[in-house]
Image (cartoon, grey):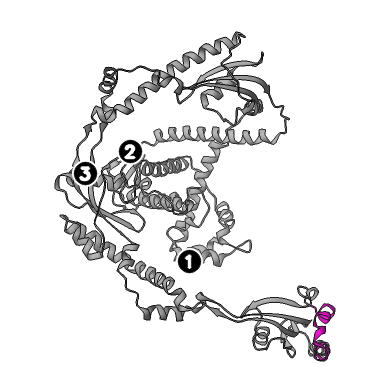
Amino acid sequence: MFEAVRKNKRISQVILAIIIIPFAFFGMDAYFSGAPGGGEVATVGKSKITVMEFDRALREQQDRIRELSGGQVDRAMFESEFFRRSVLNGLINQRVLQLYAEDQRIVVTPPQLQEFIASLPAFQDEGQFSLERYERLLRAQGMSPAMFEASVAQDIRVQAVSRAIGDTAFVGTPSVSRFVEAQLEEREIRDFPVEVERFVDAVELSEDEMRAFYDADTPRFERPERVRVEYVVFDEAAVMAQLDIDEARIEAFYEGNRDRYGVPEERRARHILIQVDPDATEEVAAEAQARAREILDALREDPSRFEELAREHSQDPGSARDGGNLGFFGRGMMVEAFDEAVFGMELNEISDLVRTDFGFHVIEVTGINPETFRPLAEVRDEIARDVGRQEASSQFAILAEQFANTVYEQPDSLEPAAELLGLEVRTSDWIERESGTLAGFRSDRLMNELFSTDAREFRENVEAVEVERGTLISARIIDYEAPARLPFDEVREAIEREMRVERAAVLAREEGEAKLEMVRAGEPVEEIEWSTIRRVQRGSPTLPAAAMDAIFRAPSTELPAHVGVPLPDGSYALYRIESVQRPELEADDPRLRLVAQQYEQIMAQKDFDAYLSALRERYPVQIRAAALRSVEP
């Protein structure tokens, strides 16, 4: 097989997208790592990760996330430093594994490589490797056989290293059993809350105390810098608003696409089939024809017997039991001769004998649904939208470039771009950098542009930023406010509420702890009305984490047992533990194996991460932060 492949000199660049190999595209990148790429984003040992490689990995990861999320992705995530570094780390980890595999002289023999590629579904036809399909797919991608084989071999070597590390993880059965039993343990409890709100109004606060709180926590009461901006949004809707779809185009589209606005004619028929093989002798065919003719003659005398004769004589197993009924169907759904006969007959007409590859048919048309079309007046608006979207799509790239150029070339105002493209210049409310949105979009890149020194000092248009696929925004600052300390009167109410709750929480805790001591000592506490019993399980928490921890830490040797816990809102809760149920697991319980597998995966991942860290020390990594940020998302 591979000799034939090697003789073909025309083939691909990124075929590994077809193949299900972990890290496959990284393998291709590594193959090209020696090629000039306009500088590097990082070096691993003596190997370089080029800007071209990083850009390709970045875009492929973006496409993968968009596909998994159905396209609903916040573009700000793609622009974030975290996302870029996670992609780069994936490339670095792949590269150190490749270098280690090379140093260890891990070899993939030609038979191994051949067997692996032959097993890939992308290159198979009806479950068997297809050389023609293999060559066609490679040819379509423009890849050479040598490049493809080298890349696949490299990925196989990396997988061999990865498996060798990951397969060493092992978890003992007793520890798994103890863990699962602990997670399945259940306790029946009652509770009594000491609510913080009971004490809030009783807290005494002076103005001086609140001012002291305000002065002691200065950074907390600082308002960050903020801006008000003018902005314009350019998207497909803006393009469509400029289009003038005249009546003639709507009518032409309607006439050219009538099948989209109607239901074609359908007919219901029944038949009686006398089977004849297409290559049957003339004698056999004549005998079958004679039998079919006898049935037809009987129907000519009494058409009401069609159902009876179909059940008795038809050799079509799918319809004979139903009296030959085939239901409704449209043109082209049956073999040609059958189709022509049915759609050339009148309602309730019985055909002459019809010969097809299946044999001789006697056919009766039993129903006709004529074609129906929605009138133009009913679909005019729908057509206008469809035509508009097509035209907008074709013009969008050109107009988007005009928009970007105009806001850049005439930086003192957004009006020229708005007038050119029929856009509206809008004004925002105050926007803060960390939480700001514009026109409903959150874009780190746009916020960075707006809060740059140049944008603030010169009040010029920022460059058009794509905040979402197909949506561009440009803006300019009209008002700016530097970071400022919020006035005491503006935050006084919030300070008072916080201080009251904080002190009320202390009172709630003191009362709760006192009641807890009393019930633990067996003293009656009239104020306590325990709730009805409810069941909690350690592995399925239904209470705050601190409460779950306290309930399951409580000794169960003497019941009922009592515990108390401060709650996140400042209240204090008492819990009375009535009973404890611990599961008894058999050695073959499937839950044990499931947890063991998950635990082994966690341990394997930890081992793998530790090994990668060691390899990154062996092959020192240097990252060029400037190059990392310079690649367009």
Q: Which mark is residue 452?
A: 3
Q: Is residue 95 left or right of residue 426?
A: right
Q: Is residue 144 left or right of residue 494?
A: right
Q: Report which residue position mark 1 lands on.
A: 8
Q: Report which residue position mark 2 lands on.
A: 622
Q: In the picture, residue 392 is in which quadrant?
A: bottom left
Badge 2 crowding class, 10 Å Cα cut-off, few under 14, some 14 to 19, many 20 or more, is few
Residue type at mark 3 is Ser
Q: In the picture, residue 386 is in which quadrant?
A: bottom left
Disc 2 secondary structure class: strand
Kindly report the distance in space between the C-alpha atoms of the residues bearing marks 3 and 1: 55 Å
**What residue range appears in magenta?**
294-315
Q: Main secondary structure of the magenta part?
A: helix
Disc 3 secondary structure class: loop
Residue 46 showing in the rendered view: no
Q: Nearer the viewer, mark 3 or mark 1?
A: 3
Residue 574, horizontal then vertical, whole percent: 55, 19
Q: Nearer the viewer, residue 432 or 467?
A: 432
Give the mark nearer the N terminus: 3 vs 2. Answer: 3
Assess whether residue 288 is covered by the magenta stretch. no
Q: Nearer the viewer, residue 177 or 192?
A: 192
Residue 149, horizontal then vertical, whole percent: 49, 55
Residue type at mark 2 is Gln
Residue type at mark 1 is Asn
Position of the N terminus by quadrant: bottom right
Kindly report the distance in space between the C-alpha atoms of the residues bearing marks 3 and 2: 29 Å
Disc 1 secondary structure class: loop
Badge 3 crowding class, 10 Å Cα cut-off, few under 14, some 14 to 19, many 20 or more, is few
Q: Nearer the viewer, mark 3 or mark 2?
A: 3
Kindly report the distance in space between the C-alpha atoms of the residues bearing marks 2 and 1: 40 Å
Residue 293 showing in the rendered view: yes
Q: Nearer the viewer, residue 45 or 70?
A: 70
